[in-house]
Image (cartoon, rainbow, N blue to C red):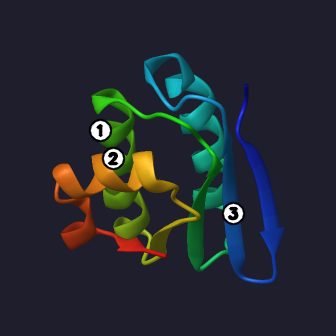
């Protein structure tokens, strides 16, 4: 399912729905670009509340988004991570590279 983009004030939220894997690459890139292009957005939150699973390609997509956000001086946070997702992020040491809430 396509990610949902929400903007509230200066916070842009990218709500992921379902498994976050390579099949979501194109939709994730388009949705994240929408937030990157929005001059009012200073913080991007990737919402994992509806994500039961993510794979290594998802980790790569998050790293690319982090780099692109940093170039535009936008902060990036990963929010609402459930235990399974949290474990994958910790194994990949993303807890040291990302703000995870």
Residue 40 in view in this figure: no
In this view, the mark in front (2 or 1): 1
Q: Which residue is mark 1?
A: 60
User: How far apart are labels 2 and 1 at the CA level?
Assistant: 6 Å
**Residue 101 position (above or below residue 26):** below
Q: Is residue 70 left or right of residue 51?
A: left
Q: How many marks?
A: 3
In this view, the mark in front (2 or 3): 3
In the rendered structure, are the residues bearing label 2 and label 1 in contact, judged by CB atoms less than 8 Å apart? yes
In the rendered structure, are the residues bearing label 3 and label 1 in contact, judged by CB atoms less than 8 Å apart? no
Nearer to me, 42 or 6: 6
Indicate the quadrant where residue 26 lies: top right
Q: Is residue 41 left or right of residue 71?
A: right
Residue 95 at x, y percent in the picture: 26, 68
Q: Is residue 62 left or right of residue 46?
A: left
Nearer to me, 50 or 84: 84
Residue 17 at x, y percent in the picture: 69, 37
Nearer to me, 11 or 49: 49
Kindly state the secondary structure of the residue where label 2 is placed.
helix
Residue drawn at the location 33% of the way across and 28% of the way down: 57
Indicate the quadrant where residue 43 lies: bottom right
Label number found at residue 13: 3
Residue 8 in view in this figure: yes
User: How far apart are labels 2 and 3 at the CA level?
Assistant: 17 Å
In the rendered structure, are the residues bearing label 2 and label 3 in contact, judged by CB atoms less than 8 Å apart? no
> Local crowd at mark 3 within 10 Å, few (<14), some, or many (≥20)?
many
Q: Residue furthest top?
A: 23
Residue drawn at the location 52% of the way across and 55% of the way down: 82
């Amino acid at each position: 399912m396509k990610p949902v983009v929400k903007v509230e004030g200066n916070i842009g939220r990218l709500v992921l729905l379902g498994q976050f894997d390579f099949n979501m690459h194109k939709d994730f890139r388009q949705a994240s670009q929408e937030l990157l292009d929005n001059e009012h957005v200073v913080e991007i939150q990737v919402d994992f509340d509806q994500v039961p699973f993510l794979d290594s390609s998802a980790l790569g997509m998050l790293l690319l988004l982090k780099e692109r956000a940093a170039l535009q001086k936008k902060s990036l946070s990963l929010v609402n991570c459930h235990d399974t997702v949290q474990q994958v992020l910790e194994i990949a040491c993303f807890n040291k590279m990302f703000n995870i809430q």
